[in-house]
Image (tube, rainbow, N blue to C red):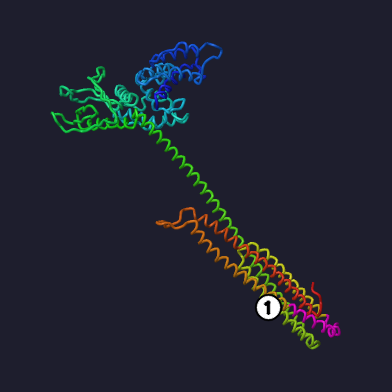
């Protein structure tokens, strides 16, 4: 953080303090006074002419921060030279203005912090706050500052109270304001059981370390260059210098060691009765010093090495560097948190898709189970119907046999014809049973396909029609037996017609058998194609798994989530391979319907021939 940014933070508080109405604008007369005071504390020449020209009283009214920035930049900040002024004076000026408006230590009934300590905490807050306006400090920096203060007091931070405070304050904005922070320190919740003097000394120590850039200070014994005697001095270490004074009030400076990348610090053995010795070597001189104990020597050598490292890296402030590092770490943590959140959302989306697919699969399984149950019920119903029909046919056959036995003496020729008719009926029943068996086997082999349910329904309707036709045939046979006595003469003439009809029915039956044989061949070819397609799908699944997940050295199992994708791809390949088979099955179904229609026609004509040329509707 450069000097201009530090000055702007303090000046921003002074500007907002002059904004009494909180409108974002300040009167020109107040800005004149503020500009004059800033020039005074910054030790830059004051230009009253430019001040009057810029803030001339006219009808424009008050000036906002955007209107004041050009003058502040051109006539004040551009003229500032580092080292020509005391920044603490600038901070005191801005603190005086802003504290009158915003700082009320007696608000909670007690004031734990003296005015000087409140000013130092305000400076520490400005140093650690974010470079965004309005100025706030993120909770991590608040915790860092409070831990530094507690460490200086050798006390432990009350983390419960701190978390409650952060959860209440940081929820309203993206950080904590300085006034809320000062109210927290004045409340004494975090420093219970601590004396005011200890807290004040800790705040001063942290202030000198962070704002004053004092890396370490304390008493050391120093060996003189000319007289070579040992004298105790108060040393103050900053990133660029190691200054020593007569006493800790720092009023009489005795010397200063300029630190740069050419300096080094070394530990020395005991000599001249001094222990815990070390030296700082520069290009022109070596400074020998002695600490009170080994711990102090280690702390001093580490601090001096840190200062030399900062000079070698071109950095002027240790805590500025640490602040930037903490900010980078927060940004990295935020990026990692955002990445984890994005990954979590992505995993949730994948999990939702997986659950939806599982639910869909479960629905499909439930639909399949229902279809199987319906098919089983349909099969049971058809079986019962066939048994009832068989029983009815047996009853009718027994009735026909009784009627024929009673008429044996009168019509021997009719009995022979009736015998031939019964044999023909038995042959048709056997053919029907064979057809039903073949149909049942086909239905069982294709019960998983929904399209074949409609074909089964049509076959069932045709079968019922044939059964109705047979029942009608039996009824007509009974009527025909009753009328045989009146039609003896007509039978002789119709024998020739029945013979021709019988030959025609035999020819049609042969055609039906030939059609049935071709249909069986088509079914066998379709099954062979189906087995070939299943083999090809398995081969394609293996090839797809090898292409999607090649085996690498040291890799033993596939990545999670890949099986679902391969399963979907395999299912699509199976659907593509089954389309030609489905078209072949549709062709087989059409051939089967043709065969059934041919069989129905043949049965009808055979019935006509057996009934003596009577048409059956």
Q: Quadrant of the C terminus?
A: bottom right
The x, y position of residue 410, in whole percent, is: 81, 87
> Which region shows up in magenta?
483-508
Task: Tell me the quarter of the picture where residue 216 sits.
Answer: top left
In the rendered structure, the answer to whether residue 258 lies left or right of residue 548 reads left
What's the residue at 16%, 22% (across, down)? 226
In the rendered structure, the answer to whether residue 113 lies left or right of residue 223 reads right
Is residue 497 shown above or below 441? below
Q: Is residue 576 visible?
A: yes
Is residue 498 shown above or below 332? below
In-front residue for pair 134/467: 134
Extreme residue in the left direction? 273
Whether the magenta-drawn stretch holds residue 499 is answered as: yes
The x, y position of residue 444, in whole percent, is: 61, 68
In-front residue for pair 140/441: 140
How many numbered tags mark residues here?
Answer: 1
Task: Tell me the quarter of the picture where residue 425 sits.
Answer: bottom right
What's the residue at 19%, 30% (across, down)? 277
């Amino acid at each position: 953080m450069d000097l201009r940014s530090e000055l702007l933070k303090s000046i921003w508080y002074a500007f907002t303090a002059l904004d009494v109405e909180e409108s974002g604008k300040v009167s020109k007369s107040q800005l004149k006074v503020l500009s004059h005071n800033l020039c005074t504390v910054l030790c830059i020449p004051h230009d009253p002419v430019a001040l009057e020209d810029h803030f001339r009283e006219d009808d424009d009214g008050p000036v906002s921060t955007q209107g004041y920035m050009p003058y502040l930049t051109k006539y004040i900040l551009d003229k500032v030279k580092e080292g020509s002024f005391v920044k603490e004076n600038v901070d005191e000026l801005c603190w005086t203005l802003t504290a009158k408006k915003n700082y009320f230590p007696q608000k909670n009934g007690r004031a734990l912090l003296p005015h000087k300590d409140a000013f130092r905490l305000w400076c520490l807050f400005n140093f650690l706050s974010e470079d965004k306006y309005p100025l706030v400090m993120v909770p991590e920096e608040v915790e860092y500052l409070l831990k530094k203060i507690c460490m200086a007091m050798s006390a432990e931070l009350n983390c419960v109270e701190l978390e409650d405070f952060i959860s209440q304050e940081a929820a309203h904005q993206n950080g904590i304001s300085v006034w809320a922070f000062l109210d927290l320190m004045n409340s004494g919740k975090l420093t219970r059981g601590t004396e005011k003097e200890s807290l004040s000394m800790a705040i001063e120590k942290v202030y000198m370390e962070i704002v004053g850039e004092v890396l370490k200070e304390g008493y050391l014994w120093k060996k003189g260059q000319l007289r070579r005697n040992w004298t105790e001095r108060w040393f103050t270490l900053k990133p660029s210098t190691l200054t020593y004074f007569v006493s800790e009030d720092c009023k009489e400076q005795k010397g200063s060691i300029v630190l740069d990348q050419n300096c080094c610090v070394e530990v020395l053995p005991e000599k001249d009765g001094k222990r815990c010795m070390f030296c700082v070597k520069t290009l022109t001189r070596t400074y020998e010093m002695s600490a009170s104990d080994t711990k102090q020597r280690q702390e001093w050598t580490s601090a001096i090495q840190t200062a030399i490292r900062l000079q070698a890296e071109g950095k002027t402030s240790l805590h500025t560097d640490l602040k930037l590092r903490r900010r980078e770490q927060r940004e990295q943590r935020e990026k990692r948190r955002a990445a984890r959140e994005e990954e979590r959302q992505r995993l949730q989306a994948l999990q939702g898709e997986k659950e939806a697919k599982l639910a869909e699969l479960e629905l499909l399984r439930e639909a399949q189970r229902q279809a199987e149950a319906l098919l089983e019920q349909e099969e049971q119903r058809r079986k019962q119907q066939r048994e009832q029909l068989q029983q009815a046919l047996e009853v009718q056959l027994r009735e026909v046999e009784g009627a024929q036995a009673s008429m044996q003496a009168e019509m021997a020729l009719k009995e022979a014809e009736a015998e031939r008719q019964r044999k023909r009926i038995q042959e048709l029943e056997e053919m029907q049973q064979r057809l039903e068996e073949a149909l049942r086997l086909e239905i069982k082999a294709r019960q998983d396909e929904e399209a074949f349910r409609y074909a089964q329904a049509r076959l069932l309707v045709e079968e019922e029609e044939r059964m109705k036709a047979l029942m009608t045939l039996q009824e007509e046979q009974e009527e025909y037996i009753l009328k045989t006595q009146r039609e003896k003469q007509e039978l002789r003439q119709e024998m020739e017609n029945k013979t021709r009809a019988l030959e025609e029915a035999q020819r049609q039956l042969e055609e039906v058998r030939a059609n049935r044989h071709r249909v069986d061949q088509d079914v066998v070819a379709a099954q062979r194609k189906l087995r070939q397609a299943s083999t090809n799908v398995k081969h394609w699944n293996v090839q797809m798994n090898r292409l999607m997940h090649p085996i690498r050295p040291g890799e033993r199992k596939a990545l999670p989530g890949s099986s679902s994708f391969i399963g979907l791809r395999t299912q699509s390949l199976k659907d593509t391979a089954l389309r030609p088979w489905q078209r072949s099955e549709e062709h087989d179904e059409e051939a089967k319907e043709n065969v059934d229609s041919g069989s129905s026609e043949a049965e009808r004509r055979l019935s006509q021939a057996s009934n003596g040329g009577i048409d059956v509707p």
